């Protein structure tokens, strides 16, 4: 019986290895399609946040306003392409007649394409890591609205890339002091001061604002002295 189980496991492992080899081509195709599409769009800012935030929520309306104002300044707006804050960002971009980009991904719940995406800028991904590379490479700034695990993943991914200089210094903005204050307090008191796991200058990478005026002005000032270009 043990030999039978061992043989079955080895067969399954061999089949898995064969599948993994072919999977490389699918991953490559997603990278190529994403690079070709996003390189044509021009300078963009990514806006992240919860898929569960609905129209009428103050953060939804704020995300829409931020996106609209940034689009009026000439930036394309990239979101994850789904509902909630993502929808608000694309809605704001279309309101300003700006470029409205969605990097969609297949999920078992919550994710569907929102109606405010430009038809030629609605990209689809199977792999989270490919999708995150697209955000990181082609965004000239990152706006983090309140969100859940996915938003935190994207926030710490970007913060790590900037901290380690794998990405050029790029604006990383947290919107909503009340929402972010608990996390930032823990980063300051525990991560930095108690455990010394980051340096004080690492906190300088993060800017925290409450209004669209603050966000837009920060980007304007930053890009008076910094070039607009892909991040790596």
Image: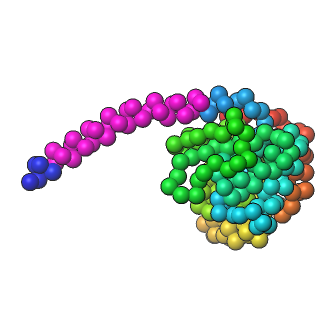
Q: Nearer the viewer, residue 18 or 37?
A: 37
Magenta region: which residues? 6-33
Work out whether residue 128 can be spotted. yes
Residue 221 falls inside the magenta stretch: no
Which residue is drawn at the image coordinates 53% and 48% (left, top)?
106
Residue located farthest toward the front when viewing the structure as drawn: 115
Q: Nearer the viewer, residue 16 or 108?
A: 108
Work out whether residue 80 can be spotted. no
Quarter where residue 101 is shown: top right
Q: How is the image coloured?
A: rainbow
Q: Nearer the viewer, residue 173 or 91?
A: 91
- Percent x, y of residue 61: 81, 61
State the predominant SS element of the stretch in magenta. helix
- Percent x, y of residue 29: 52, 30
Quarter where residue 146 is shown: bottom right
Q: Indicate the quadrant containing the C terminus: top left, top right, bottom left or bottom right.
A: top right
Whether 58 is drawn above or below 6: the answer is: below
Which residue is drawn at the image coordinates 52% and 52% (left, top)?
107
> How many marks can you see?
0
Which residue is drawn at the image coordinates 86% and 61% (left, top)?
211
Q: Nearer the viewer, residue 176 or 104?
A: 104
Is residue 141 found left or right of 132 in the rendered image? right
Which residue is drawn at the image coordinates 65% and 63% (left, top)?
52
Q: Indicate the quadrant containing the N terminus: top left, top right, bottom left or bottom right.
A: bottom left
Is residue 103 found left or right of 201 in the rendered image? left
Is residue 207 found left or right of 213 in the rendered image? left
- Percent x, y of residue 60: 76, 61
- Percent x, y of residue 212: 87, 57
């Amino acid at each position: 019986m043990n030999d039978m189980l061992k043989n079955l496991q080895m067969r399954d492992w061999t089949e898995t290895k064969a599948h993994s080899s072919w999977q490389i081509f699918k991953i490559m195709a997603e990278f190529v399609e994403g690079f070709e599409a996003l390189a044509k769009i021009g300078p963009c800012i990514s806006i992240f946040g919860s898929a569960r935030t609905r129209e009428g929520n103050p953060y939804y309306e704020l995300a829409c306003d931020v996106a609209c104002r940034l689009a009026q300044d000439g930036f394309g707006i990239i979101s994850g392409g789904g509902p909630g804050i993502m929808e608000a960002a694309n809605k704001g971009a279309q309101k300003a007649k700006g470029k409205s980009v969605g990097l969609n991904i297949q999920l078992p719940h919550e994710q569907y394409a929102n109606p405010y995406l430009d038809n030629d800028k609605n990209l689809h991904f199977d792999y989270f890591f490919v999708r995150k590379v697209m955000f990181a490479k082609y965004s000239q700034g990152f706006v983090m609205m309140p969100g859940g695990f996915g938003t935190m993943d994207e926030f710490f991914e970007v913060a790590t890339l900037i901290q380690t200089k794998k990405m050029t210094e790029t604006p990383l903005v947290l919107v909503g002091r009340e929402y972010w204050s608990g996390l930032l307090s823990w980063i300051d008191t525990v991560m930095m001061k108690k455990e010394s796991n980051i340096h004080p200058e690492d906190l300088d990478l993060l800017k925290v604002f409450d209004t669209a005026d603050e966000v837009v002005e920060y980007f304007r000032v930053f890009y008076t002295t910094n070039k607009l270009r892909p991040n790596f």
